[in-house]
Image (cartoon, grey):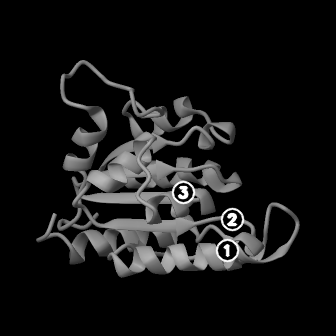
């Protein structure tokens, strides 16, 4: 474990993609590296993996709703946005990318994205046709122009049966990129 990055606070956003199950492995790996992992799930993500799975692996309550307030007067999404050393969204659906690009904040993940000053790393996962759509490409470029980091997607067989660009980047690679961003941006967070 790197001395420079251990013990950081990572907000792990999980969105509605078949690859949501891989967030379990990612959360577990980040916790093993000594990070405090706070999982925030969209409603659509819960169709693919349960909050309980991610709660057990992250060892923390999962935020699944904008109004999940826990024993504090301070809004939970603002607390997470302030505490984050990194906002990592893996997998990121086309919908989540569009919502971030357009500044929508009617769910916990969107609100945290707007409120955080931490670096943001997005790992897309979707059908290749969705990834290649001009709207998605424009949304990605908009976010990149605002300093959002992207990793992937990768080429391969997709859950829908098509082959092409759209698979979630391997979890080990996402973990390594998160560590790299934490090291590079450490003075800023």
59 over 104 or under it: above or below: above
Q: Which residue is mark 3?
A: 96
Give the CA separation, mark 2 to mark 3: 11 Å
**Residue 170 picture quarter:** bottom right
Q: Is residue 181 left or right of residue 131?
A: left
Q: Are marks 2 and 1 in contact (CB under 8 Å)?
A: yes
Q: Residue at x 74, y 74 (%)?
A: 128
Residue 137 horizontal/vertical position (percent): 59, 79
Q: Which residue is mark 1?
A: 131
Q: Residue at x 51, y 75 (%)?
A: 140
Element type where label 1 sits in the image = helix
Q: Quadrant of the N terminus?
A: bottom left
For this orientation, the residue located farthest to the right is 161
Disc nearer the start of the sequence (3/1): 3
11 over 98 or under it: above or below: above
**Residue 120 picture quarter:** bottom left
Viewer-proximal residue among 42 and 136 = 136
103 over 36 or under it: above or below: below
Element type where label 2 sits in the image = loop
Q: Which residue is mark 2?
A: 126
Viewer-proximal residue among 97 and 34 = 97
Give the CA separation, mark 3 to mark 1: 12 Å
Classed neighbour count for the residue bearing mark 1: other residues with Cα under 10 Å, few (<14), some (14–19), many (≥20): many
For this orientation, the residue located farthest to the top is 71
Give the CA separation, mark 2 to mark 1: 6 Å
Element type where label 3 sits in the image = helix
In the rendering, which numbered label is found on residue 100? none
Q: Residue at x 40, y 67 (%)?
A: 121
Residue 183 horizontal/vertical position (percent): 23, 73
């Amino acid at each position: 474990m790197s001395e420079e990055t251990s013990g950081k606070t990572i907000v792990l956003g999980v969105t509605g993609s078949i690859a949501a199950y891989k967030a379990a492995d990612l959360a577990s790996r980040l916790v093993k590296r000594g990070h405090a992992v706070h999982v925030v799930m969209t409603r659509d993500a819960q169709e693919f993996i349960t909050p309980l799975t991610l709660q057990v692996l992250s060892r923390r309550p999962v935020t699944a709703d904008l109004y999940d307030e826990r024993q504090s007067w301070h809004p939970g999404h603002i607390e997470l946005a302030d505490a984050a050393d990194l906002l990592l969204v893996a997998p990121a659906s086309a919908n989540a990318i569009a919502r971030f690009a357009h500044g929508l904040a009617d769910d916990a993940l969107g609100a945290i994205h707007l409120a955080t000053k931490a670096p943001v790393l997005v790992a897309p996962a979707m059908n290749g046709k969705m990834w290649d759509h001009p709207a998605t490409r424009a949304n990605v470029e908009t976010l990149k122009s605002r300093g959002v980091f992207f990793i992937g997607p990768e080429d391969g067989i997709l859950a829908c049966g098509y082959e092409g660009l759209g698979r979630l980047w391997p979890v080990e690679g996402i973990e390594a990129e998160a560590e790299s961003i934490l090291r590079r941006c450490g003075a800023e967070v």
